[in-house]
Amino acid sequence: MHFQWDWLCLGVLIMSSVTAGMENEENLDADVEVENFDKQSQEADVDRDKSSIEVAYQTPKPTGEVYFTESFDEGLSRWVLSVTLKEDTDDNVAKYDGRWEVEELKENAMPGDKGLVLKSVAKYHAISAMLTKAFVFDDKPLIVQYEVNFQKGIDCGGAYIKLLSSSNDLNLEYFFDKTPYTIMFGPDKCGEDYKLHFIFRHKNPKTGEYDEKHAERPDVDLKKFYLDKKTHLYTLVLKPDDTFEILIDQTVVSKGSLLENMIPPVNPPKEIEDPTDKKPDDWDERPKIPDPNAVKPDDWDENEPAKIEDPDAVKPEGWLDDEPQYVPDPNAKKPKDWDEEMDGEWEAPQIPNAKCEAAPGCGEWVRPMKNNPKYKGKWRAPMIDNPNYQGIWSPRKIPNPDYFEDPHPFKMTTVSAIGLELWSMTSDIYFDNFIICSEKEVADRWAADSWGLKKLVASANEPGMFSQLVTAAEEHPWLWVLYILTLALPVGLTVLFCWPGKKSDECIAFKKPDISKQITKGELKEEAEEFEDDELEEEKENEAPDEDEVEGDEDIYDDDDENEVPDEEENEVLDGSQDDGFNKSDSEDEKKEDDEGMGDLPLKSVRKRRVRKD
């Protein structure tokens, strides 16, 4: 049994270790690894005596071919503020007068690292810049990457960017919501709707018109990226094979095909429903109909009510028919400012009648209602299969006159500028480190030199696990119960299965402390045999005495039996149970056995022989 408890205890400890390991793995998986950190970000010096980490920040520089980069460390010299008005909006709010600033992060800032910050609330903002060189959708991938930090969280507003389409009449001072764009990408949130946009405008090859194509929503929960007040890295990768990937913090959150995972689809269906086709008047879509041959039974009474009075009910004894359930409050007084002309005649408020509390009821007694056993309700014919059922009608299909097939929607309109056209109910939205390129390695290196350092500083300044648990419990008090159960369960199991239990009374009785040894029957027997062997050896050495002498000896023994006083050695044997005392916890049966054993063996003769031998 003890062996089984050891194994059970070991199993509990192993399960606790495995659970802790799984939790650690989940926490590690939740933090996205930053790929290809350079030596500068890895060798940052951490001062353990301070709460923050000091990093020698330098403005990141691209390591390959790029179409646009911006770190905002040099200000807004290349950016243009819009001066136009938003269409279809009241004049007092239509102006793009939202304020932009270049400043450091409010938390976990690095000296010298600045970003673009949206400062105004409930205003339209528009700012844009030309690319270093236009991006042509040909045989190279398009990679768009930038950072966003909702420093105050976000109630309702966006943080997406637009890649503006190339045109001869593109004027950044008049950049507004109707300015043609090729791609819109980034986070957006209003209410509890958390979105990550990827929209591209596709040109219909037949009509020349542009339609917006929206990527399917990611399957991951985006809420934490909007509310944790951390800097997150958003990346869009478009490939010439008409596939795309969307990443947050260098982890893929959505991917698919431009031909299959866009809403509405890029290519329209080959066939459509004929808009001129109409359902015939005699088309029967009813799968079931009432049985025309069914007849209502003669005993079916539709006039019977569903409830009737219970004729067997009896008014309870003590029912007060003359007492109302409510009476005017005798202690109520008319307010001093009561105006009978304006307020009418004053009446005391009603209170429950005190006499009804002790009685089964007051007022007029009415018989209770019960279900009517004769009630059947309105008769309806049973339903049967419709022999004329023709199914659900649908219009016939005809070839789609607007059908086309674009096998390569990646070949979009050339991009020549980047812009932010936003409206928000929350201020201090931080943007930083924009890059547009064609090589993933270039974007990753740029991220390592910028976002990677921010993540390193933020991780070093995060509170410990205990502080995080306490903070979470303050926001959600029910977590305290979970914490207590989580701690108490393994402790309770350990104490229950691994702590040494109390010994039973039988074990205590079986293993009594040897305080004073008793003279048992076996010990007396062994002692008697020992002395008999000694007597035999003496007889062999000496001559045998004559009979008279032997008889004399026996007389002496008899006399000694009556008058002998035991010496000290005899007292030790005889009085062992008196001087040292038998253990008081011994049972009565043991004492009786000892007494009987002492009576059966020749105790006195043994002692006399010992005296004589001495």
Image (cartoon, rainbow, N blue to C red):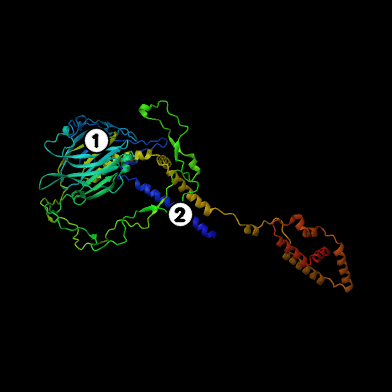
277 left or right, relative to 522: left
Query: Percent from the top left, x then y, of residue 515?
Result: 70, 55
In-front residue for pair 178/312: 312
Q: Amino acid at mark 2?
A: Ile
Looking at the rendered structure, the number of numbered marks drawn on it comes to: 2
CA separation in Å, label 1 and label 2: 54 Å
Query: Percent from the top left, x then y, of residue 16?
Result: 45, 52
Residue position for label 1: 423
Is label 1 in a helix, a strand or a loop? strand
Query: How many C-alpha atoms fall within 10 Å of the one at disc 2: few (<14), some, or many (≥20)?
Result: few
Residue position for label 2: 14
Please say if 612 is above or below 488: below
Foreground mark, 1 or 2, reads 1
Query: Do the numbered discs 1 and 2 sit on residues whose CB atoms are within 8 Å?
Result: no
Give the mark nearest the N terminus, 1 or 2. 2
331 left or right, relative to 599: left
Q: Amino acid at mark 1?
A: Trp
- Quadrant assignment, res 508: bottom right
| Residue at 24 percent of width and 60 percent of height | 290
Please say if 601 is above or below 226: below
Query: How many C-alpha atoms fall within 10 Å of the one at disc 1: few (<14), some, or many (≥20)?
Result: many
Is label 2 in a helix, a strand or a loop? helix
Query: Percent from the top left, x then y, of residue 55?
Result: 34, 36
